[in-house]
Amino acid sequence: MRLNDLFDPEKGPAALLRFALYPLLLIVICQALAVLLSRLSIADMFLAFVFLLLLSPLAYFIREKRGHERERGGGRRGGAERTPILPTNEEME
């Protein structure tokens, strides 16, 4: 978001709402996470940490595998290719 958006009559209200709403939403999410983590024991926190530690490489490998399928053409949707149409001699004159 640019600072000029706040002074634009058309984009200003929406930008001001985002400017006020996003930090409030971030505070609420962080507070809920803090309450959730405060109720966990040390063993539960360790298990959650190990789970996230194992989940991160798995997500990376899945993402890499899907990315390579798109490069080989596995991610194409199919359909006709667009070919350029050259103008006829009548249009040139």
Image: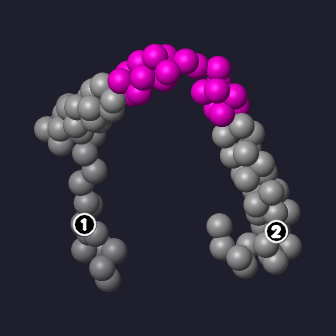
User: Mark 2 or mark 1: which comes first in sequence?
Assistant: 2
Q: Position of residue 77 (x, y in %)?
A: 31, 33
Label 1 packing within 10 angstroms: few (<14), some (14-19), many (20+): few
Image quarter (top left, top right, bottom left or bottom right) of the C terminus: bottom left
Q: Amino acid at mark 2?
A: Gly
Q: Secondary structure at mark 1?
A: loop
Q: Position of residue 78 (x, y in %)?
A: 27, 33
Residue at 64% across, 32% down: 33
Q: Secondary structure at mark 2?
A: helix
Residue at 77% across, 48% down: 24
Q: Is residue 89 visible?
A: yes
Q: Which residue carries the number 1 mark?
A: 86
Image quarter (top left, top right, bottom left or bottom right) of the N terminus: bottom right
Q: Which mark is residue 12?
A: 2
Left or right: 92, with 9 as reference point: left
Q: Quadrant of residue 88?
A: bottom left
Residue at mark 2 to residue at mark 1: CA–CA distance: 46 Å
Does residue 82 sit above or below 6 in this rendering? Answer: above
Label 2 packing within 10 angstroms: few (<14), some (14-19), many (20+): some
Q: Position of residue 56 (x, y in %)?
A: 33, 32
Left or right: 61, with 29 as reference point: left
Q: Of all residues shown, which one is farthest toward the left? A: 72
Q: Which region shows up in magenta?
A: 32-52
Q: Amino acid at mark 1?
A: Leu
Q: Of all residues shown, which one is farthest toward the front? A: 42
As for residue 4 lying within the magenta part, the answer is no
Q: Main secondary structure of the magenta part?
A: helix
